[in-house]
Image (tube, rainbow, N blue to C red):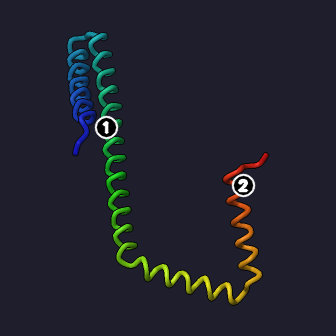
Amino acid sequence: MVDTDRIVGAAKDVGGRVQGAVGDAVGSNRASLEGRYREAEGRVQQAYGQAKDTLRDVADDVGDYAGDAYDRVRQHGGTYLRDGRAAVESRVEESPFLALLIAGAVGYGLALLLHGRR
């Protein structure tokens, strides 16, 4: 979907070029300058419309990706949870002291985030 700013900007760009060329041809500095101004204004409006289109496309892509991820988790979430739990259990059994230190550090970090430093 093309943004209307891109269309209006393109029209201003072309109109400004024509006005600038006509101003140059007839020797009117004012018409030439106004044409160049409209041309620049049109280019800026086109760029703005293109940026809006790009952001809209990115938002659509992120939404699609999130939907796909949600569907995958719904289908395979139990498997992921079991595999993750088994991996954590094996690491904790291998080095319980390190696991305790990591858990304490995570808890301390969360407390700082929630309550901040005073």
Q: Quadrant of residue 21?
A: top left
Quadrant in the picture for the N terminus: top left
Describe residue 90's horizontal placement relative to residue 13 as left or right.
Answer: right
Q: Quadrant of residue 46?
A: top left
Q: Is residue 70 left or right of residue 115?
A: left
Residue holding disc 1: 49
Q: Residue at x 35, y 36 (%)?
A: 48
Inter-mark Cα distance, 2 to 1: 42 Å
Count of marks, rendered view: 2
Residue drawn where x is 34% and y is 37% of the image: 47
Q: Secondary structure at mark 1?
A: helix
Instruction: State which quarter of the image contains the C terminus.
Output: top right
Residue identified by numbered label 2: 112
Measured as percent of width and height from the top left, residue 34 is found at 30, 16
Which image quadrant is residue 20 in?
top left
Please report the residue visible at 67 percent of the width from the left and 53 percent of the height from the top: 114
Residue 42, compared with residue 98, is above or below; it is: above
| 59 in relation to 107, above or below | above
> SS class of the residue under badge 2?
helix
Residue under the point 62% across and 88% down: 90
Instruction: Where is residue 28? Give x, y as percent.
Output: 26, 10
What amino acid is labelled 1 in the image?
Answer: Gly
Is 45 in front, or is 87? 87
For marks 2 and 1, the one nearer the N-term is 1
Above/below status of 79 relative to 14: below
Q: Residues within 10 Å of mark 2 (few under 14, many from 20)?
A: few
